[in-house]
């Protein structure tokens, strides 16, 4: 994985760290306010729908904010994992050549562009041979467990095997934790996972692959470019880089206000 900014925990709208929770609960806790598009979230290499988050448990592992290449699916920017290995190698090489660069997106675009080209990633470059910012997005990456009730996770968006998730042979304690976490009733008992006990069926053919598989993998959540929308999303604790960018944009707007040619678009940062 490319180096990014690591966060030990994710906080809800009351500024409290979120433990094990459904990804729907995580989003409703305030995170959705800084998400670019709720239809742009991927579990591994599968673009999911917002309702699919009900079947995914955030594993309380914190998160990382990182710039990654994107592709467009149904008009929405999503992570492009088809080039992730080459991109990781290119980014690592750039960091070796420019170790003092601590920005999420490289400060030396000419050097980074040359390295991307050397790694065959010309599709990520603009007409000037520089990294095309339209092909990148900052993602919040978190890990979790997904319950595949309708065979919606094990294939990627193109209908091929989702190679970026792992089929977990979950023990009873993990299954109980997932069921309890994803339940919505007060007793934490209304979410059921079919464990597929083979010994309760007549033959192997009758149970093969019909139970609820549990997959572990990363969720790639595209973050909004609009710092102002994030700052007003409940009391969401923004990643540091968003706070930093907001401050930089604020200073720019303050300078613009003193200019005679200031426009409404300048003030609104459009």
Image (cartoon, grey):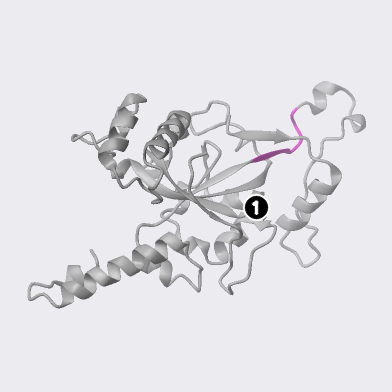
Q: Residue at x 63, y 66 (%)?
A: 17
Q: Point out residue 66 in the picture as x, y percentages from the top left corner.
A: 46, 48
Quarter of the image containing the C terminus?
bottom left
Instruction: Answer with the quarter of the image where residue 15 lies.
Output: bottom right
Identify the secondary structure beneath mark 1: loop
- Name the side, left or right, on which 73 lies relative to 54: left
The image shows residue 229, relative to residue 54, as above or below, that is: below
- Residue 268 showing in the rendered view: no
**Residue on which the image places disc 1:** 61
The image shows residue 82, relative to residue 29, as above or below, that is: above
Q: Is residue 153 magenta?
A: no
- Residue 107 or residue 25, whichever sits in front: 107
The image shows residue 198, relative to residue 44, as above or below, that is: above
Instruction: Answer with the quarter of the image where residue 225 lies.
Output: bottom left
Q: Residue at x 37, y 36 (%)?
A: 97
* Residue farthest to the left, as pictured: 260
Tell me where the magenta segment starts and ends, as one range. Answer: 209-216
Q: Residue at x 53, y 32 (%)?
A: 156
């Amino acid at each position: 994985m490319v180096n990014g900014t690591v966060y030990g925990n994710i906080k809800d709208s009351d500024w409290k760290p979120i433990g094990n929770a459904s990804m729907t609960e995580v989003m409703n806790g305030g995170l959705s306010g800084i998400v670019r598009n709720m239809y742009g979230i991927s579990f591994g290499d599968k673009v999911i729908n917002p309702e699919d988050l009900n079947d995914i448990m955030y594993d309380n592992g914190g998160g990382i904010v990182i710039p990654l290449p994107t592709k467009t699916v149904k008009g929405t920017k999503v992570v492009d994992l088809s080039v992730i290995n080459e991109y990781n190698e290119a980014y690592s090489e750039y960091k070796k050549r420019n170790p003092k660069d601590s920005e999420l997106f490289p400060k030396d675009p000419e050097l980074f562009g040359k390295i991307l080209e050397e790694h065959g990633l010309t599709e990520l470059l603009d007409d000037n041979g520089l990294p095309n910012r339209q092909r990148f997005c900052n993602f919040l990456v978190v890990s979790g467990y997904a319950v595949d009730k309708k065979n919606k996770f094990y294939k990627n968006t193109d209908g091929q095997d989702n190679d970026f998730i792992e089929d977990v042979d979950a023990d009873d304690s993990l299954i109980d934790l997932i069921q309890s976490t994803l339940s919505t009733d007060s007793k934490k008992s209304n979410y059921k996972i079919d464990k597929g006990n083979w010994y309760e069926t007549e033959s192997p053919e009758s149970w093969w692959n019909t139970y609820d598989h549990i997959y572990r993998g990363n969720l790639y959540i595209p973050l909004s470019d609009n710092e102002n929308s994030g700052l007003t999303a409940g009391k969401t604790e923004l990643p540091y880089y968003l706070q930093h960018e907001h401050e930089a944009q604020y200073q720019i707007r303050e300078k613009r206000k003193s200019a005679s040619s200031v426009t409404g678009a300048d003030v609104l940062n459009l």
